[in-house]
Image: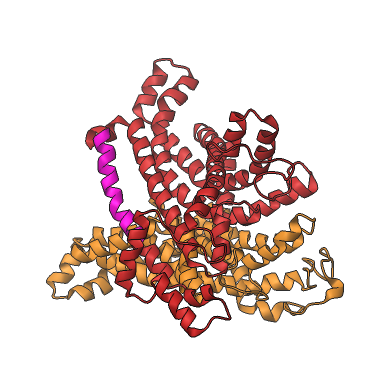
């Protein structure tokens, strides 16, 4: 553990960009947890006198067509976007991870069924499938989480399956089996802890995609509904004003989205360097 | 070669079956009662029931599936409840617009990403290499609809170089006579330079948006595989034989380095086809993506089903094409199969 931490410090020291990503991550978490308590103005309060004002000292990010403060809305939206991303990634981590480990460890018909499901999902362009799923299950935030989890499923299954398959006949697994452990116990106590770090890396690598996917869905009008502050829908609301020069309405939520995704991608790369240095590019 | 294509076609069949089953299940789960929607708000219970029978919604799921597959075999994707048009006609009319945009987006991204990747690989650690990494990482982090809006703001509002982001052609022009459905090609066939310029100027920003979005995986893969190939023995031999650096890179290294890049094109297409929907919404592009979005909002199931199915079939076909291309470039793949 200490060696791992030392290695982590070395990697962060070698690559200052990872340090920056950690800083951004802390900022996002703070905004997600304390956001609504921190912002100066109610994100839903409209003020038609102050509508469509450019950024100023009173409204740092300006105001939208209803006079709502964009800074407050961007900060408050962090919680919703972050929750959607985390929930979908945790869901697919649990389902995809276990399906993949089981498929890789036990093989046979289970492997074929899981593989077939993953292949079928991969036969679709992923965002299109996510659109279809949200439309089918109903236009709610929960279903955005489910759809994002489903389109990420094949990625998790592949990684977990490959890692579990390599360890299926490893010496320590044989030893555990010879000393009388059942299959389930071997999977839980021997295989899982070994596959876990690689899955965590996978998780942070797909976080950025999960946020983009959710924001894209709400941009086309699925899931989150106005007036709820959410980055994708705020960009959609501001898109009509872009051609008439009111850039700030769409710009700030879009920039927040970009920074969040950028942060998770860098963090994922950094984590991968720590856990699995061979795959460094 | 032919046997390889046939074998690959057979492998694609289970994917297609899976796609048909999933699209069927998805649209049967759509919220709202299509029969009630179709009948209108003033309809009586009996009228709704009649429509339900006419649409075949009273039958069991298995029976409905058989009917659905039968309709598909006849090329019937149903009728849109909101526009009253058959879905097949709508998709046929709108598909060229989406295809032209997506393909041009791919061309733009390859035109930027491949030279960038090669330059980065030939000068590792240089400014170009770092720029390549930064651009690639930034490219994946940019939400595609956001890039589109920024480009609109800069090139339309600030600079005034681009036309308003409203569809395929300025209102002053009429569409060229349809041959391929691609305005760029059709206007050239018709010999109408004005329409060509006009449609190119409308296409430029959305295609650039898609290009920026799909740049990252291609640039990364080109860089990585060029690096691997450049350090291989045959490149060393070619260099030692005194060939010019240009010949070594283009004739020897590039052709071999392209193989993994072509493989990643499959993934790139998955991204592009999805991003296409968002870009079409930003630029009011009359393609199948915006058609599907309108239908989604109205819970109109036939167009959504048709759209998801069309996209999935296109994607399976593109993957097939990529595999064939791979076989053409690399004779080893042909021999192995």
In the rendered image, residue B254, in percent from the top left (x then y), is placed at: 44, 29
Q: In which quarter of the image is the N terminus of chain A?
A: bottom left
In the rendered image, residue B249, in percent from the top left (x then y), is placed at: 46, 25
In the rendered image, residue A127, in percent from the top left (x then y), is placed at: 49, 59
The chain assigned the colour orange in the figure is A
Q: Quadrant of residue B53?
A: bottom left
Q: Which residue is drawn at 13% across and 75% down?
A: A180
Question: Does residue B303 sit above or below B40 in this rendering?
Answer: above
The answer to whether any part of residue A125 appears in the image is yes
Is-magenta flag for residue B2? yes
Q: Count how many numbered circles sit on residues in the image.
A: 0
The colour mode here is by chain
- Which residue lies most toward the right here? A49
Residue B241 as seen in the image, left or right of residue A23: left
Is-magenta flag for residue B176? no
Residue A123 as seen in the image, left or right of residue A130: left
Q: Quadrant of residue B330?
A: top left
Magenta extent: B1-20
- Which residue lies most toward the top here? B242
Residue A48 as seen in the image, left or right of residue B319: right
Magenta residues, dominant SS class? helix
Q: Residue at x 79, y 59 (%)?
A: A246
In the rendered image, residue B238, in percent from the top left (x then y), is placed at: 39, 20
Q: Residue at x 42, y 50 (%)?
A: B315
Q: In which quarter of the image is residue A69?
A: bottom right
- Which residue lies most toward the bottom here? B45
The answer to whether any part of residue A158 appears in the image is no
Question: Does residue B154 sit above or below B259 in this rendering?
Answer: below
The chain assigned the colour red in the figure is B
Who is closer to the viewer here, B162 or B94? Answer: B94
């Amino acid at each position: 553990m200490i060696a791992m931490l030392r290695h982590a410090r070395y990697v962060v020291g070698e690559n200052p960009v990872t340090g920056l990503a950690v800083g951004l991550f802390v900022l996002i978490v703070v905004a997600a947890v304390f956001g609504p308590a921190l912002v100066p103005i109610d994100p839903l309060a409209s003020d038609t006198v102050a509508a469509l004002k450019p950024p100023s000292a009173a409204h740092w990010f300006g105001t939208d067509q209803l006079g709502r403060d964009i800074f407050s809305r961007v900060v408050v939206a962090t919680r919703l976007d972050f929750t959607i991303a985390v929930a979908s990634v945790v869901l697919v981590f649990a389902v995809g991870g276990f399906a993949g480990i089981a498929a890789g460890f036990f093989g046979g018909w289970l492997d074929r069924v899981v593989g077939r499901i993953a292949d079928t999902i991969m036969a679709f362009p992923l965002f299109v499938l996510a659109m279809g799923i949200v439309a089918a299950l109903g236009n709610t935030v929960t279903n955005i989480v489910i759809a994002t989890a489903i389109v990420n499923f094949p990625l998790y299954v592949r990684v977990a399956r490959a890692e579990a398959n390599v360890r299926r006949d490893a010496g320590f697994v044989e030893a555990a089996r010879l000393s009388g452990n059942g299959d389930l116990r071997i999977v839980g106590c021997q295989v899982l802890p070994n596959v876990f770090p690689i899955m965590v890396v996978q998780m942070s690598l797909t976080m950025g995609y999960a946020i983009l996917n959710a924001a894209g869905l709400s941009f086309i009008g699925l899931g989150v509904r106005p007036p709820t502050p959410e980055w994708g829908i705020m960009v959609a609301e501001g898109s009509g004003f872009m051609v008439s020069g009111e850039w700030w309405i769409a710009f700030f939520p879009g920039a927040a989205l970009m920074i969040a995704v950028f942060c998770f991608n860098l963090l994922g790369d950094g984590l991968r360097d720590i856990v699995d240095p061979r795959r460094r590019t | 070669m032919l046997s390889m294509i046939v074998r690959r076609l057979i492998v694609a069949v289970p994917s297609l079956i899976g796609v048909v089953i999933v699209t069927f299940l998805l649209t049967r789960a759509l919220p709202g009662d299509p029969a009630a929607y179709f009948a209108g708000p003033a309809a009586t219970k009996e009228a709704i029931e009649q429509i339900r029978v006419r649409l075949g919604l009273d039958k069991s799921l298995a029976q409905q599936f058989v009917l659905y597959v039968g309709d598909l075999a006849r090329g019937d994707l149903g009728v849109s409840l909101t526009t009253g048009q058959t879905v097949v006609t709508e998709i046929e009319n709108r598909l060229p617009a989406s295809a032209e945009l997506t393909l041009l987006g791919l061309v733009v991204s390859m035109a930027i990403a491949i030279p960038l990747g090669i330059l980065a690989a030939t000068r590792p650690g240089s400014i170009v290499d770092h720029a390549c990494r930064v651009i690639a990482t930034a490219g994946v982090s940019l939400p595609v609809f956001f890039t589109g809006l920024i480009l609109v703001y800069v090139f339309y509002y600030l600079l005034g170089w681009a036309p308003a982001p409203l569809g395929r052609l300025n209102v002053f022009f009429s569409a060229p006579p349809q041959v391929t459905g691609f305005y760029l090609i059709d206007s050239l066939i018709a010999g109408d330079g004005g329409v060509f310029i006009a449609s190119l100027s409308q296409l430029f920003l959305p295609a650039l948006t898609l290009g920026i979005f799909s740049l990252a995986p291609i640039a990364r893969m080109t860089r990585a595989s060029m690096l691997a190939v450049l350090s291989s023995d045959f490149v060393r031999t070619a260099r030692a034989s005194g060939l010019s650096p240009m010949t070594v890179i283009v004739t020897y290294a590039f052709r071999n380095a392209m193989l993994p890049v072509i493989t990643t094109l499959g993934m790139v297409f998955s991204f592009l086809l999805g991003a296409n929907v968002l870009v079409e919404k930003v630029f009011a592009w009359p393609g199948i993506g915006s058609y599907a979005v309108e239908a989604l909002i109205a819970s109109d199931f036939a167009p959504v089903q048709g759209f998801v199915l069309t996209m999935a079939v296109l994607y399976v076909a593109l993957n097939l094409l990529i595999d064939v291309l791979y076989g053409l470039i690399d004779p080893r793949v042909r021999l192995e199969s």
